[in-house]
Amino acid sequence: MPHRSNAKPHASGADVAACRATLRGGSRTFFAASLALPKSVRKPATGLYAFCRMADDAIDQGADRAAALADLNARLDRIYAGTPDDIAADRAFADCVYRFAIPKLFPEALLEGFAWDAEGRRYENLSQLTAYAVRVAGTVGAMMAMVMNVREPALVARACDLGVAMQLTNIARDVGEDARNGRLYLPREWLREAAIDADAWLARPAFKAELAAVIARLLAEADVLYARSDSGLANLPAACRPGMFAARLLYAEIGREVARRRYDSVNERAIVPWQRKARILADAMLAAKRDAPMREWPIMREAEFLLAHLPAAAQAKAALAPAPPESARERARWPRIEDRVIWLVDLFERLERREHSTTNSAGAV
């Protein structure tokens, strides 16, 4: 049987609002795309992402990473015991775990990926890097699938593909920023093939054509996984498709923006202009309306350990707590999926203007 915590719903409306504020400030792409999801999915997804974001920040920004990891694992134990800490994200994630029977292995694997970051693990080849991406991103994709009441292994495998593709895109975009923080995620085997000494480059990071070829190679791998994820997205519940296609297309566009900048992600960070985001969201709306047959792609080897612990679809369905129906007020506000996506277009414009204003103000200080 799938794991069920002993928890009963703990999160209040204030907790959900606090989680939403966390994502609005630090995960704008997810926050905006999530607004296209139905409320029954949006609320638990917000709790899931807030916990993941909080855990990432605790490791990344903490002075003692080992202590932060130990604390997170202890908090996870209490979440699954049904006694979450007095923290909004913990209570919201406890509710998510309870309602959707999420196996503990999935968030444990996420924290394992954060532990690899804390120890400064190096990745010799693409398989090792993929194993890392499965943990820090594929797990999130799989848990999101469960929040959508999806349990079919082929669909969850495509969710893992999408999460890994997004992580590879992040790595390609942040090469310079990571290097300045002493991190290098690019496969060292690829760097040697490009005649780049990884340690020497990390000591003095600079952009050059050989590095551009490695970044392009990584983005090509991401594009393969984005393409594999498409049939999975097309077979999600209809109300969930616009938001997930929006996230998929927006992240893929980040990779294209890196390419437009000749793969120089050392000297600048690729940002997609809001006007292009608006066009992408329109594309997402069209893609969400198309039905497509499920493609039988193999499960990536690095994700097999996750899928082996996936609850059987029939068992999980029996274990799920019923989702509260969308209120009449909510239905009146968003009578059509198209209205949700139109709202996203306006939101992206306002977010970009605010970011531009904040950047200019900081530069003026």
Image (spheres, rainbow, N blue to C red):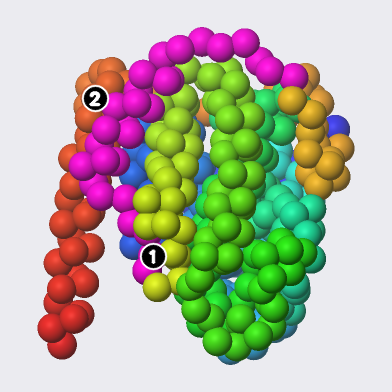
Q: Is residue 47 visible?
A: yes
Magenta-span inclusion, residue 280: yes
Instruction: Classify mark 2: helix, strand or loop.
Output: helix
Q: Nearer the viewer, residue 277 or 140?
A: 277
Q: Is residue 9 above or below residue 145?
A: below
| Side of 273 relative to 202 (left or right) | left
| Side of 119 relative to 327 (left or right) | right
Numbered mark located on residue 29 in the image: none
Magenta-span inclusion, residue 270: yes
> Residue at 47% of width from left, 42% of height from top?
252
Identify the image quadrant of the N terminus: top right
Residue type at the position of mark 1 = Arg
The answer to whether the residue labelled 2 contacts the one labelled 1, judged by CB atoms less than 8 Å apart, is no
What range is drawn magenta here?
268-296
Instruction: Classify mark 1: helix, strand or loop.
Output: loop
Packing grade of label 2 (10 A; few <14, some 14-19, many >=20) is few
Percent from the top left, x then y, of residue 174?
49, 66
> Residue at 44% of width from left, 64% of height from top?
264
Q: Is residue 197 above or below residue 276?
A: below
Packing grade of label 1 (10 A; few <14, some 14-19, many >=20) is some
- Indicate which disc, 2 or 1, sits on the residue closer to the N terminus: 1
Numbered mark located on residue 339 in the image: 2
Q: Which mark is nearer the camera, 2 or 1?
A: 1
- C-alpha span from label 2 to label 1: 31 Å
Percent from the top left, x then y, of residue 89?
51, 59
> Residue at 67% of width from left, 26% of height from top?
155
Percent from the top left, x then y, of residue 307?
80, 37
Residue identified by numbered label 1: 269
Q: Quadrant of residue 73?
A: bottom right
Residue type at the position of mark 2 = Asp
> Residue at 15% of width from left, 73% of height from top?
360
Q: Quadrant of residue 285?
A: top left
